[in-house]
Image: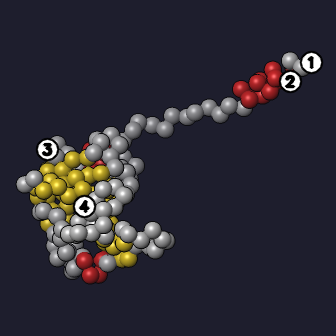
Amino acid sequence: MKYLYPILLALLFTQCKEELKPIGEPFSQLEGINDTWQLTSIEQIDELDKGDNAPLDVSNIMMGTQAAIMTFNSSDFTYTLTPGTMRNFFPTNGTWFFDDNDFPAVITLENSGAQFECKLQAPIRRESGEDELVIKYIRPIGNCTVLEDGLKGAVGYQYRFMRQ
């Protein structure tokens, strides 16, 4: 009888096992970013604040009256930026690369050796109908504090773009 209980428990747990269902083919981040994007908002983030302060919407101040347009080409890894009237920290053209083409966390814009590292705030999907690109750029400022990830700065900007 003492051997019967472990056998019954093992049978019970093996019978209740949930079947894993396929979730489909992984989507390509390279195909997802390959498009033209229009800036819709900019939020400012205090990178030194460890509290619960929400980002500050600075779209009215930073975007101006004409929206910026950014185009990424994943066949030759180039980009162009038409800044419109926004307050711009990036070069208007250059090359770009992900830190990992399959599972990117960072996109880096590069022009004449200068690199601008932007953290992706969400996956970039084309197949699922997701039409938003959200990147965060921590603006390096002189002798500011070195942040946890090694970047120097105190102010971050979160840019939201919509696919055109």
The amino acid on which the numbered mark 4 sits, given as a three-letter code, is Trp
**Residue 155 sits in quarter:** bottom left
Q: Secondary structure at mark 3?
A: loop
Residue 15 position in % (x across, y down): 73, 27
Earlier sequence position, callout 3 versus callout 1: 1
Mark 4 highlights which residue?
37
Residue at 44% x, 73% y is 54
Earlier sequence position, callout 3 versus callout 2: 2
Q: Is residue 153 above or below residue 57?
A: above
Q: Secondary structure at mark 4?
A: strand
**Dividing the image into 4 quarters, which one contains the C terminus?**
bottom left
Q: CA distance from mark 1 to mark 4?
A: 69 Å
Residue 107 position in % (x across, y down): 26, 52
Is any atom of residue 83 visible in this view?
yes
Residue at 32% x, 46% y is 104
Residue closest to the far left = 112
Which numbered tag is attached to residue 76? 3
Q: Around disc 3, counting alpha carbons within 10 Å, would you say few (fewer than 14), some (14 to 19), or many (20 or more)?
A: few
The reply to whether the C-beta atoms of the residues labelled 1 and 2 are less than 8 Å apart is yes
Q: CA distance from mark 3 to mark 2?
A: 64 Å
Mark 1 highlights which residue?
1
The amino acid on which the numbered mark 3 sits, given as a three-letter code, is Asp
Q: Nearer the viewer, residue 122 or 127?
A: 122
Mark 2 highlights which residue?
5
